[in-house]
């Protein structure tokens, strides 16, 4: 039986929200081993907590050497991204989290929606340290994400190992 998820206090500060979010995510992944099911619930948790514009995973497809759209919350999105292309493709290529304050000023950004203004992309690694996906979060406001988001979201995706 899945553990009940308690609602997050809307007045909590960002770090408090992340602390609770990570506990909830731990409860979810500890009772399910399927990666896609866990990715799906993790995007729902993030959407419920922060209500960002678009939250989703792109998974590495080794056959095509592309990122392919995985579980997400938000409007329709591009399905495939080439290695090194867009912020997602750059994060896959470099293995480094990227925070983009203004996507329109980022030359390599792929605009799936003209409403996206800022974004953060985090690499997702397996036990062997290989990048198997990226977590892409888009905001419809400028400069939404900072290092606090980066640090917590890196811990968050560790749970998928
Ligand atoms: N923002 C991404 C493209 C994916 S969509 O925004 C969902 C990028 O430039 O990599």
Image (cartoon, grey):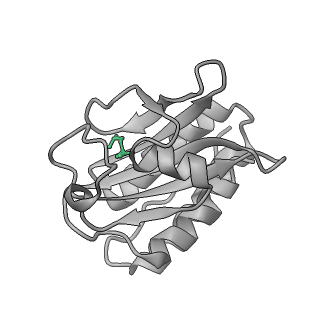
Left or right: where 29 falls relative to 41:
right
Left or right: where 107 falls relative to 61:
left
Where ligand 1 lies, by image quadrant? top left
Q: Quadrant of the N terminus?
A: top right
Counting from the top left corner in percent of width and height, residue 44 is at 44, 44
Counting from the top left corner in percent of width and height, residue 151 is at 56, 72
- Vertical placement of 42 versus 142: above or below? above
| Residue sitting at x 29%, y 53% | 107
> Is residue 148 at all visible to an observer of this figure?
yes
Counting from the top left corner in percent of width and height, residue 88 is at 46, 46
Q: State the residue lying farthest toward the left.
A: 114
Name the one closer to the observer, 11 or 158. 158
Q: State the residue lying farthest toward the top.
A: 63
Q: State the residue lying farthest toward the right.
A: 128
Counting from the top left corner in percent of width and height, residue 37 is at 60, 32
Left or right: where 155 falls relative to 77:
right
> Is residue 4 at all visible to an observer of this figure?
no
- Vertical placement of 11 versus 33: above or below? below
| Residue sitting at x 58%, y 48% | 93
- Vertical placement of 91 versus 74: above or below? below
| Residue sitting at x 84%, y 47% | 128
């Amino acid at each position: 039986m899945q553990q009940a998820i308690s609602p997050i206090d809307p007045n909590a500060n960002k770090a408090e929200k992340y602390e609770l979010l990570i506990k909830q995510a731990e409860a979810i992944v500890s009772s399910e081993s399927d990666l896609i099911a866990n990715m799906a619930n993790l995007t729902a948790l993030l959407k419920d907590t922060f209500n960002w514009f678009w939250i989703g995973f792109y998974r590495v497809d080794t056959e095509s050497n592309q990122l392919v759209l995985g579980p997400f919350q938000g409007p329709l999105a591009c399905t495939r991204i080439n290695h090194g292309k867009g912020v997602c493709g750059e994060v896959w290529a470099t293995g480094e989290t990227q925070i983009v304050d203004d996507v329109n000023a980022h030359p390599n950004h792929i605009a799936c929606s003209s409403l996206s203004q800022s974004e953060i992309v985090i690499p997702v690694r397996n036990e062997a340290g290989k990048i198997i996906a990226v977590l892409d979060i888009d905001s419809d406001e400028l400069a939404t994400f900072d290092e606090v988001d980066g640090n917590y979201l890196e811990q968050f995706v560790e749970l998928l190992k």
